[in-house]
Image (tube, rainbow, N blue to C red):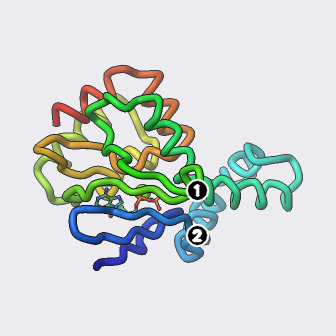
């Protein structure tokens, strides 16, 4: 069994043909992310999305991170036939823990990732979850998104019908 700790919001156990996703918080990544926002001068703007009061915003954000699996599960329930998403084959505790089939995760040097990233950036998309190869994988010869828990990711997938097509055809 392999344990993937690189995600911000999920600890992933790879066992056989399955990926078991458990909620967690990668504090190193979280602090890196806060420092980047601070450096870019967007920290306050981003924090305000989660509440006017800083403490409340922090709690809301932690809740947002820990409920990633449930958001992914609810999104998948609405889009079960979509061929650009890695399916969720089992969910426990109302989607708090989810199981996906294991995909072959893309890397920066993968030719299909270069192709996909080229098309995504051509469209002017900068959203963080859609420009990371580790959020995509090869599954049944298709490229699919394995991390679609983000509210903004889901909004973009719904808002622009071309994004799913770009993913599938890369
Ligand atoms: N279905 C899957 N198949 C193979 N690896 C996966 C799968 N789901 C997640 N992973 C691995 O676990 C990492 C973290 O999962 P992800 O869904 O991206 O969570 P996070 O919200 O923490 O970024 C991924 O970058 C990938 O390496
Ligand atoms: Mg991810």
- Residue at position x 54%, y 38% in the image: 152
Instruction: Tell me which label, 1 or 2, sits earlier in the chain.
Output: 2
Q: Is residue 88 above or below residue 157?
A: below
- Residue at position x 52%, y 30% in the image: 155
Q: Give the number of the disc on residue 25.
A: 2
Q: Is residue 133 above or below residue 162?
A: below
Q: Quadrant of residue 66?
A: bottom right
Q: Report the front residue among 25 and 79.
A: 79
CA neighbours of label 1 inside 10 A, class few (<14), some (14 to 19), many (20+): few
Q: Report the front residue among 47 and 24.
A: 24
Image x and y of residue 120, in percent: 30, 36
Image x and y of residue 131, in percent: 36, 47
Image x and y of residue 62, in percent: 69, 61
* Left or right: 162, with 8 as reference point: left
* Left or right: 18, with 128 as reference point: left
The residue to which callout 1 is attached is: 93
Q: Quadrant of residue 164?
A: top left
Mark 1 or 2: the one toward you: 1
- Count every numbered label the image shows and give the total: 2
For label 1, the SS is helix
Q: Quadrant of residue 141?
A: top left
Q: Is residue 17 above or below residue 141?
A: below
Q: Report the front residue among 134 and 41.
A: 134
- Residue at position x 88%, y 53% in the image: 53
């Amino acid at each position: 069994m392999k344990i993937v700790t690189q995600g911000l919001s999920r600890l992933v156990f790879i066992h056989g043909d399955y990926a078991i996703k458990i909620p967690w918080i990668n504090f190193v990544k979280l602090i890196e992310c806060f420092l980047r926002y601070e450096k870019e001068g967007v920290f306050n703007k981003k924090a305000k999305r989660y509440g006017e009061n800083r403490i409340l915003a922090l709690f809301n954000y932690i809740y947002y991170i820990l409920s990633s699996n449930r958001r992914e599960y609810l999104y998948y329930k609405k889009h079960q036939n979509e061929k650009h998403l890695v399916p969720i084959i089992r969910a426990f505790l109302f989607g708090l823990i989810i199981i996906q089939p294991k995909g072959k995760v893309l890397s920066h040097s993968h030719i299909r990732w270069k192709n996909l990233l080229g098309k995504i950036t051509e469209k002017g998309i900068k959203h963080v979850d859609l420009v990371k190869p580790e959020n995509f994988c090869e599954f049944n010869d298709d490229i699919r998104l394995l991390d679609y828990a983000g509210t903004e990711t889901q909004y973009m997938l719904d808002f622009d019908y071309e994004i799913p097509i770009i993913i599938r055809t890369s």
